[in-house]
Image: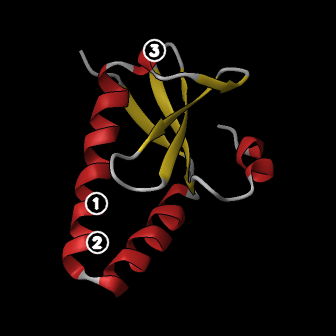
């Protein structure tokens, strides 16, 4: 059974920046990114333990075919989505988010 998801307040901005970038290239590309993102959200809700820990209890899931990652924590009662980051971005700010 899939766990419920809770989102850090900045995830909407993270996702908006990424989708805007791909929409500027092509609306079709933006739609493919959105679809890949939704698929990965479903995966990490259904099987959060299958993704590797990167910092303490924080885990990361890559977005298929795109250079983006979802940073999350697998909590007892829900999955906390902490951020959506470009894989080549500076990771120093990734681990400062918490819920």
Q: Residue at x 22, y 62 (%)?
A: 32
The residue indicated by pointer 2 is 30
Q: Residue at x 77, y 52 (%)?
A: 93
Above or below 90: residue 77: above
Q: 38 or 21: nearer the eye?
A: 21
Secondary structure, mark 3, is helix
Q: Quadrant of the N terminus?
A: top left
- Say whether marks 2 and 3 touch (CB < 8 Å): no
Above or below 81: residue 27: below
Q: Quadrant of residue 86?
A: bottom right
The residue indicated by pointer 3 is 49
Indicate which disc, 1 or 3, sits on the residue closer to the N terminus. 1
- Say whether marks 1 and 2 touch (CB < 8 Å): yes
Label 1, label 3: how far apart the Cα atoms are:
23 Å
Q: Residue at x 58, y 59 (%)?
A: 10
Where residue 24 appears, as percent x and y from the top left, is 36, 86
Residue 34 shows which numbered tag? 1
Q: Quadrant of residue 39?
A: top left
Secondary structure, mark 2, is helix
Where residue 97 appears, as percent x and y from the top left, is 71, 44
């Amino acid at each position: 059974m899939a766990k419920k998801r809770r989102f850090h307040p900045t995830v909407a901005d993270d996702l908006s920046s990424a989708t805007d970038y791909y929409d500027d290239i092509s609306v079709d590309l933006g739609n493919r990114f959105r679809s890949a993102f939704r698929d990965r959200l479903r995966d990490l809700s259904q099987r959060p333990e299958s993704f590797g820990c990167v910092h303490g209890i924080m885990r990361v899931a890559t977005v298929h075919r795109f250079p983006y990652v979802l940073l999350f924590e697998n909590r007892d009662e829900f999955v906390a989505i902490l951020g959506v980051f470009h894989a080549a971005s500076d990771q120093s700010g990734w681990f400062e988010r918490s819920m």
